[in-house]
Amino acid sequence: MDPPDDLDNYLRGDSALSRQYKRESAPIPPHALDRRVLEFSREAYGKPPCLAPLAFAASVLLSVALVLAILFGPQSAKRVDNAPHLVRVAAHANASTNAPLNRKLELYSSDPRLARAPAVWLADIAALRRAGRNAEADAELRRFRSAYAGYCNRRACD
Amino acid sequence: MEFLDEDAALMTRYRDGDADAFTRLYAHHKGPLYRYLLRQVRNAGAAADLFQEVWSRLIATRSRYVARAKFATYLFHIAHNCTVDFFRRDLAMRRGARFDEVEQSTEPEVPEYQRPDVIAEFAEQQSALLAALGALPQEQREAFLLHEETGLTIEEIARVTDVGLETAKSRMRYAIRKLKKSLASVHSAGTQPIRTRGNLKDTLVNGSA
């Protein structure tokens, strides 16, 4: 067995064995090997390791968005169709391309710029009364009278 | 954050996206790693393959790097695992070759680095010390190389090779004893101790005990 301090001497780096090893030739990797490793490093750097989970998360997000659009898309369109306040502006902006819709919406409009021809307006009011929506019909009639003040004096409006 | 060594800081920078940090890391460690692998497997082709494999693994797992110890322990732990895999594959190949030999009575396919003429050629290019080193059991050779090439302590060598402290110490002690004995026998033969074919043969015969 070696003396107990032989290993310690060697580990301190002052042994003849270490000195002899350090005198040996010190081969290094060929340049081609250097190039391959460094190229691989650069290629890998272009692809972050977290790319795959991110791509997966993006796919899930897009799928969920698509499903939500399919489920709620038509319903929301229907709701808009039935909501005079929401569609009023759209009807105003799109008056020439969607005449039937505009016709229906004008009935509920309080926008003076959307004032209709008196006969049309009165027909709308009569339609409201036939449908039993008297409160709305009264409100429309008040607006009609303010828009066409002299019209009701010449004709019966009620 | 404080790092145990400059290379741990470089590896952390590389992990965080600094590609240039890798170039510096590579420059620091390519020589020691190449010599460690070359002297472990004793074949230039196999060493080159392992060298690439070690760096590839380091690059692929960079996002998981945490600077808990010296960077060399991290790098050479990967290298240790690669060489262990290499020796396992090599053993399986040799067993397969023996099986085929029995089954088919034909000459087995032996990897180039195992061919006797290649081994002899490699041995003849070595000094007495390297020849004696090559004759050591693989675990003892590894302990010696890790200390010589990287300056790792016994505790760090134990961590790199996944063994207890006493096992690592024992391997190192045996490695030193056998190397000294081999070199002493070369000296006592009265020939030039280094880089002669005559004493190399003596070393290979006497130093493999």
Image (cartoon, coloured by chain):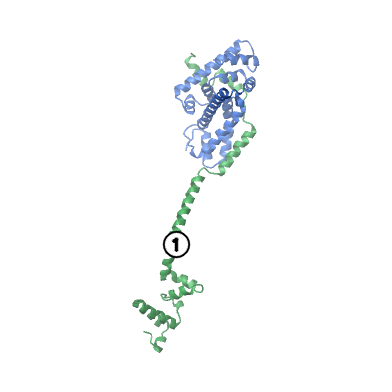
The residue located at (58%, 12%) in the rendering is: B185
Chain shaded blue: B
The residue located at (41%, 71%) in the rendering is: A84
Q: Secondary structure at mark 1?
A: helix
- On screen, residue A84 versus residue B147, left or right, reads left
Q: Callout 1: few (<14), some (14-19), or many (20+) C-alpha neighbours within 10 Å?
A: few
Q: Which residue is mark 1?
A: A73
Residue located farthest toward the front when viewing the structure as drawn: B104
- On screen, residue B197 versus residue A104, left or right, reads right
Q: Amino acid at mark 1?
A: Gly
Q: Nearer the viewer, residue B2 or B182?
A: B182
Compared with residue A30, is residue A150 higher up or lower down, i.e. above or below? below
Question: In the picture, residue A108 is in which quadrant?
Answer: bottom left
Compared with residue B31, is residue B133 higher up or lower down, i.e. above or below? above
Chain shaded green: A
The answer to whether residue B51 is visible is yes
Q: Nearer the viewer, residue A110 or B43?
A: B43
Q: Nearer the viewer, residue A50 or B11?
A: A50
Q: Chain of mark 1?
A: A
Compared with residue A153, is residue B86 higher up or lower down, i.e. above or below? above
- Give the total of numbered labels: 1
Q: Position of residue A16 (x, y in %)?
A: 56, 17
Q: Position of residue B193 (x, y in %)?
A: 62, 15
The residue located at (53%, 34%) in the rendering is: B7
Q: Position of residue A67 (x, y in %)?
A: 45, 56
Quadrant holding the C terminus of chain A: bottom left
Residue located farthest toward the bottom when viewing the structure as drawn: A154
Q: Position of residue A102 (x, y in %)?
A: 46, 74
The answer to whether residue B150 is visible is no
